[in-house]
Amino acid sequence: MNERITRWEGSDANGPRAVLVKHDGPFAEILQEALRKLAKYEDEEDDERILHLPCAIGTPVVKIEADQHDGYWLEGKLFELRDLTTFGEYVFLNKRDADKKLKELKDNSPLYKELRNIGLLCD
Protein backbone atom coordinates (compact mmCIF):
# COMPACT_ATOMS: atom_id res chain seq x y z
CA MET A 1 0.00 0.00 0.00
CA ASN A 2 1.25 3.48 -0.84
CA GLU A 3 2.00 6.00 1.86
CA ARG A 4 -0.65 8.70 2.17
CA ILE A 5 0.44 12.12 1.00
CA THR A 6 -2.80 13.85 2.01
CA ARG A 7 -5.09 13.93 5.02
CA TRP A 8 -8.47 15.46 5.86
CA GLU A 9 -8.44 18.31 8.35
CA GLY A 10 -11.45 19.48 10.33
CA SER A 11 -15.09 18.89 9.52
CA ASP A 12 -18.48 20.46 9.70
CA ALA A 13 -22.05 19.34 8.96
CA ASN A 14 -21.09 18.86 5.27
CA GLY A 15 -18.08 16.61 6.02
CA PRO A 16 -14.32 17.24 5.83
CA ARG A 17 -13.35 20.85 5.18
CA ALA A 18 -9.78 20.77 3.89
CA VAL A 19 -7.18 18.46 2.41
CA LEU A 20 -3.67 18.88 3.75
CA VAL A 21 -0.62 17.73 1.81
CA LYS A 22 2.39 16.24 3.58
CA HIS A 23 5.36 18.68 3.68
CA ASP A 24 8.44 16.43 3.60
CA GLY A 25 10.14 18.06 0.62
CA PRO A 26 9.80 20.84 -1.86
CA PHE A 27 6.15 21.71 -2.22
CA ALA A 28 6.17 21.35 -6.01
CA GLU A 29 7.41 17.73 -5.74
CA ILE A 30 4.79 16.87 -3.15
CA LEU A 31 2.05 18.48 -5.22
CA GLN A 32 3.25 16.65 -8.34
CA GLU A 33 3.14 13.32 -6.45
CA ALA A 34 -0.39 14.09 -5.22
CA LEU A 35 -1.51 14.88 -8.77
CA ARG A 36 0.07 11.65 -10.11
CA LYS A 37 -1.74 9.66 -7.47
CA LEU A 38 -5.03 11.43 -8.24
CA ALA A 39 -4.57 10.78 -11.97
CA LYS A 40 -3.93 7.08 -11.28
CA TYR A 41 -7.13 6.78 -9.23
CA GLU A 42 -9.10 8.67 -11.90
CA ASP A 43 -7.74 6.30 -14.58
CA GLU A 44 -8.73 3.29 -12.47
CA GLU A 45 -12.19 4.77 -11.90
CA ASP A 46 -12.61 5.44 -15.65
CA ASP A 47 -11.63 1.81 -16.34
CA GLU A 48 -14.14 0.68 -13.67
CA ARG A 49 -11.36 -0.96 -11.65
CA ILE A 50 -12.29 0.73 -8.37
CA LEU A 51 -14.73 -1.14 -6.19
CA HIS A 52 -16.74 0.88 -3.67
CA LEU A 53 -17.80 -1.39 -0.83
CA PRO A 54 -20.86 -0.67 1.34
CA CYS A 55 -18.74 -1.47 4.41
CA ALA A 56 -15.31 -2.81 5.29
CA ILE A 57 -14.52 -6.51 4.93
CA GLY A 58 -15.17 -8.10 8.34
CA THR A 59 -17.93 -5.68 9.36
CA PRO A 60 -20.77 -7.40 11.24
CA VAL A 61 -23.81 -7.78 8.96
CA VAL A 62 -27.17 -9.54 9.05
CA LYS A 63 -27.80 -12.15 6.35
CA ILE A 64 -31.04 -13.75 5.33
CA GLU A 65 -30.47 -17.48 5.00
CA ALA A 66 -32.92 -19.96 3.47
CA ASP A 67 -33.55 -23.57 2.58
CA GLN A 68 -36.52 -25.47 1.21
CA HIS A 69 -37.37 -27.16 4.52
CA ASP A 70 -36.89 -24.45 7.14
CA GLY A 71 -37.76 -21.38 5.10
CA TYR A 72 -36.02 -18.09 5.90
CA TRP A 73 -34.11 -16.93 8.98
CA LEU A 74 -31.63 -14.22 9.99
CA GLU A 75 -28.02 -14.88 10.86
CA GLY A 76 -25.30 -12.54 12.05
CA LYS A 77 -22.09 -12.87 10.03
CA LEU A 78 -19.06 -10.86 8.98
CA PHE A 79 -19.13 -9.10 5.61
CA GLU A 80 -17.11 -10.87 2.90
CA LEU A 81 -16.39 -9.73 -0.64
CA ARG A 82 -18.71 -12.42 -2.02
CA ASP A 83 -21.60 -10.75 -0.13
CA LEU A 84 -21.37 -7.74 -2.44
CA THR A 85 -23.63 -9.28 -5.09
CA THR A 86 -26.49 -9.77 -2.61
CA PHE A 87 -25.96 -6.67 -0.48
CA GLY A 88 -29.30 -4.93 0.11
CA GLU A 89 -31.15 -8.02 -1.07
CA TYR A 90 -30.05 -10.70 1.43
CA VAL A 91 -27.20 -8.96 3.30
CA PHE A 92 -27.83 -5.88 5.46
CA LEU A 93 -25.91 -3.61 7.81
CA ASN A 94 -28.66 -3.64 10.42
CA LYS A 95 -31.37 -5.95 11.72
CA ARG A 96 -34.18 -3.47 11.02
CA ASP A 97 -33.56 -3.58 7.25
CA ALA A 98 -33.06 -7.35 7.33
CA ASP A 99 -36.33 -7.83 9.26
CA LYS A 100 -38.21 -5.72 6.70
CA LYS A 101 -36.88 -7.81 3.80
CA LEU A 102 -37.47 -11.06 5.72
CA LYS A 103 -41.14 -10.13 6.21
CA GLU A 104 -41.44 -9.35 2.50
CA LEU A 105 -39.89 -12.72 1.57
CA LYS A 106 -42.14 -14.60 3.96
CA ASP A 107 -45.26 -12.77 2.75
CA ASN A 108 -44.47 -13.82 -0.84
CA SER A 109 -43.30 -17.36 -0.07
CA PRO A 110 -45.56 -20.24 -1.18
CA LEU A 111 -44.29 -22.30 1.78
CA TYR A 112 -45.24 -19.64 4.33
CA LYS A 113 -48.58 -18.97 2.59
CA GLU A 114 -49.47 -22.67 2.80
CA LEU A 115 -48.41 -22.86 6.46
CA ARG A 116 -50.63 -19.84 7.22
CA ASN A 117 -53.54 -21.36 5.27
CA ILE A 118 -53.47 -24.59 7.26
CA GLY A 119 -53.03 -22.76 10.57
CA LEU A 120 -49.44 -23.78 11.33
CA LEU A 121 -48.08 -20.25 11.09
CA CYS A 122 -49.41 -17.07 12.64
CA ASP A 123 -48.36 -13.55 11.66
Image: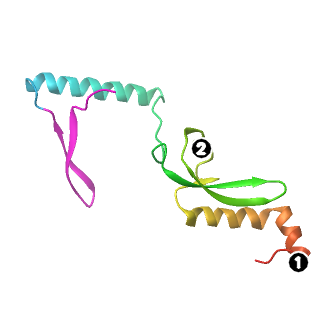
User: Gap in Å between the C-alphas at discs 2 and 1?
Assistant: 35 Å
Asked if residue 77 is positioned above or below residue 84 in the image, the reply reads below
Mark 1 nearby-residue class (10 Å; few <14, some 14–19, many ≥20): few
On the image, which quarter does residue 2 sit in? top left
Q: Quadrant of the C terminus?
A: bottom right
Asked if residue 16 is positioned above or below residue 42 in the image, the reply reads below
**Magenta-span inclusion, residue 73:** no
Mark 2 nearby-residue class (10 Å; few <14, some 14–19, many ≥20): some
Q: Residue at x 83, y 54 (%)?
A: 68
Q: Main secondary structure of the magenta part?
A: strand
Q: Residue at x 29, y 29 (%)?
A: 38
Which sits earlier in the primary sequence, circle 2 or circle 1?
Answer: 2
> Residue at label 1?
119
Q: Residue at x 63, y 57 (%)?
A: 75
> Residue at label 2?
83
Q: Position of residue 72 (x, y in %)?
A: 74, 59
Query: Residue type at mark 1?
Result: Gly
On the image, which quarter does residue 113 sit in? bottom right
Asked if residue 14 is positioned above or below residue 1 in the image, the reply reads below
SS at badge 2: helix
Q: Which residues are magenta?
A: 1-22
Q: Position of residue 87 (x, y in %)?
A: 58, 49
**Magenta-span inclusion, residue 13:** yes
Query: Residue type at mark 2?
Result: Asp
On the image, which quarter does residue 22 sit in? top left
Q: Is residue 18 left or right of residue 80?
A: left
Q: Quadrant of the N terminus?
A: top left
Q: Are marks 2 and 1 in contact (CB under 8 Å)?
A: no
Q: Position of residue 71 (x, y in %)?
A: 79, 59
